[in-house]
Amino acid sequence: MGVLDFIFGRRKKALPEDRNSPLERAMHELALKECPENRKNVYEALLAAMLLIPVPEIPPGLDRGPGLHTTTTEVQFQFSMPLDRNNKRVAPAFTDAEALQNWDPNTPYIGIKAQEFFRLVMGTDVQAVVINPFDPIRKMIRPGGRVTRAELDLLSKGIVPTQIGPKGVQFHLKSNETRYVGIPAKRPSEGLEASLRDKASEVPEIDELYLFQMATKGASHTVIGIVLNKIIARTLEDQIATTLGDHIQRKIEKGESLDFLILRGSFRDQVRATGILIFHR
């Protein structure tokens, strides 16, 4: 890690300034009412938050007592990755020290910016980050929730998901955002590309599919660009992208991700000139 702010600690009384009040408030509102706006508020609050992460031990040289510190050197540390009741590996994270102590009153912890932590998690086989879990023998004292791996993938890049499905997530690119198009360093498997071609041939609105790498500020995505042969409603466009994504879900290798994007206007022309054509009707 580069220049990061950390909080180091063991057992200490939770101070008001340790609380992630905007995040806690957003999670509470989402628990009361599940809707896109409330979920968006949680994502935005997460990206602005620093989370407390339980660790087996504070790395050597960093145990300088409670409080906020900054490191300018590379730091390696381990974080807890227990199995949940479904035998899936998860990473616990907490909004404040009191919430962490409600889970385990004796564990040391490191505070790290949420987006940076999500980047670390994406390099492991952790399937979700669980925020504010608590020991069953104690009462819940903070709102909490579970951030899935699909959500973590976008949040680790600073992107707010706009729609969550059982097999993927959707997000919108900003209209004025600069995008760079290139060729992926590693193509998906031939079996995956063949499966995409087969499915695209069944959808009469799809005219072409392009494979390309798209870089935006702070993020890079391997993308399947979809060229349609007629104008249709945005809801139908979303359905087409979801159909392709669901079809190849099981063929995506571990650690691999693939985005789907409807191409239009000058950006479509840019992708046609640079990307790899993998399907043409």
Image (spheres, helix red, strand yellow):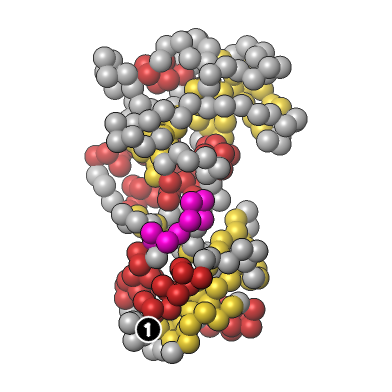
Within the magenta stretch, is there residue 251? yes
Query: Which stretch is magenta?
Result: 249-256
Residue to which mark 1 is pinned: 201
Q: Decide if residue 163 is in sight here.
A: yes
Assess whether residue 176 is covered by the magenta stretch.
no
Residue 46: give x, y in percent of width and height.
47, 40
Q: Is residue 50 above or below residue 57?
A: below
Q: For this rendering, which residue is in front, 104 or 281?
A: 281
Q: Main secondary structure of the magenta part?
A: loop
Instruction: Name the image quarter holding the N terminus.
Output: top right
Vertical placement of 52 versus 156: above or below? above
Q: Quadrant of residue 59?
A: top right
Percent x, y for residue 127? 42, 41
- The residue most toward the right is 73
Q: Amino acid at mark 1?
A: Ser
**Height in image: 259 above or below 54?**
below
Which one is in front, 107 or 257?
A: 257
Please, which residue is most extreme toward the front here?
A: 191
Residue 93 appears left or right of 2: left
Going 34% across and 56% down the picture, which residue do you hit?
A: 167
- Could you say where residue 156 lies in the image, as x and y percent from the top left? 53, 46
Percent position of residue 260, x then y: 46, 68
Q: Residue at x 53, y 19 (%)?
A: 56
Q: Nearer the viewer, residue 154 or 122?
A: 122
